[in-house]
Image (cartoon, rainbow, N blue to C red):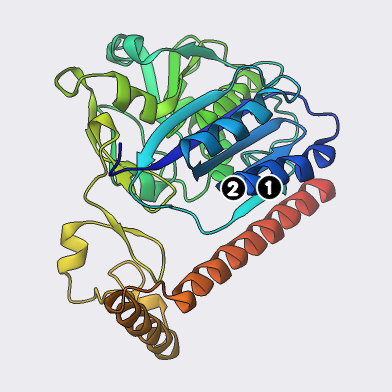
Amino acid sequence: MSQQPICIAALYKFTRFEDPDALREPLQEVCEANGVMGTLLLAEEGINGTIAGSDAGIAAVIAHIHALPGCAELELKYSRSAEMPFHRMKVRLKKEIVTLGQPGVDPTQDVGTYVDPQDWNALISDPDTIVIDTRNDYEVALGSFEGAIDPETASFRDFPGWFREQRTKLLGNTNKPKVAMYCTGGIRCEKSTAFLKAEGIEDVYHLKGGILKYLEDIPEEESRWRGECFVFDERVSVGHGLVPGDFTLCRACRFPLSDEDRASDLFIEGVSCPHCHGGKTAEQRARYAEREKQSRLARERGQAHVGAKQEKLRAERKAEKLAEKEAARQAARQGDG
């Protein structure tokens, strides 16, 4: 533990918050007071996020969250890191804690059946079970369960449209087949089961605790998982036992990179990779190259490179603004419909 002093807690809970805005500031304050960093999302449907800090700091924040309405029990996953994977603390208000874009879907009212990791292999081995990966395409590329269907979606918001288009092909003309779904930590597959039940599918299941809980609990020799699992922090990916994997991130586009990607002529550390090289301008690549140079010089001096940190924060803010604009655009479309 001494070599991995940072405790990481990934958590979520679908529960009804009547006034999430009133919860935001006290939660932000307890995180900051205990040196905890990361992101927590609050919405009327509950809480979701990943935070990191000392063991004592994380314990204090989790105790605060447990005291929130309906949060005495959380879907909670701990792991450890040698370094702090986040650079600031954000508690944000959202319409959804995981964006599906389907106003009629309420996971606080009706979801599928939880399946513990110890029972998952038997379920997905049943020939009558349809297994669906609810994650994004770039996550699935790193690893998946044997026989799982990859929707090849770029965003979780795309899942409802994909399912409606593929429903007849997947289920035939009956609602009888069992549908089992999974994701990284459990939140997306849980909301997916609520969506399928709203669509009239009754026999739906989701992996409790997600892939991370499965990789922690199931011995590798018994595992039906193949590859690594993408995680949304600086570890990039993890394997069985939640051991950090072999993937790194492209600092230009934030896409996970394999050894093969890094061996490509299009890969330049901190500047480009095979996934983004053609989509970046010469001006952008020059800016990335200067940022990487300054970061390298700072590392050689044993200093933190402030410019790199600020660049990452700007990228995070830009991504958040784009997501908010897209959510507003989709909401407007639904209103017009």
The image quadrant that residue 260 belongs to is bottom left
Check disc 1 and give the amino acid type: Val
Q: Residue at x 55, y 38 (%)?
A: 57
- Whether the residues at callouts 2 and 1 have beta carbons within 8 Å, the answer is yes
Check disc 2 and give the amino acid type: Thr
Q: Which residue position is annotated with label 1?
A: 91
Disc on the earlier residue, 2 or 1 = 2
Whether residue 123 can be seen here: no
Q: Is residue 333 left or right of residue 110?
A: right
- Measured as percent of width and height from the top left, residue 52 is found at 49, 44
**Residue 234 — which label?**
none
Local secondary structure at mark 1: strand
Residue 7 vs 174, above or below: the answer is below
Q: Residue at x 51, y 10 (%)?
A: 203
> Between residues 59 and 213, which one lies in front from this camera angle?
59
Q: Is residue 267 left or right of residue 332?
A: left
- Label 2 – label 1 distance at C-alpha: 6 Å
- Measured as percent of width and height from the top left, residue 70 is found at 72, 19
Whether residue 117 can be seen here: yes
Q: Residue at x 21, y 63 (%)?
A: 261
- Using a 10 Å C-alpha cutoff, classify the residue at mark 2 as few (fewer than 14 neighbours), some (14 to 19) or many (20 or more): some
**Split into 4 quadrants, where in the image is the N terminus?**
top left
Local secondary structure at mark 2: strand
Q: Which residue position is annotated with label 2?
A: 39
- Measured as percent of width and height from the top left, residue 240 is found at 24, 31
> Between residues 23 and 147, which one lies in front from this camera angle?
23
Q: Residue at x 55, y 44 (%)?
A: 158
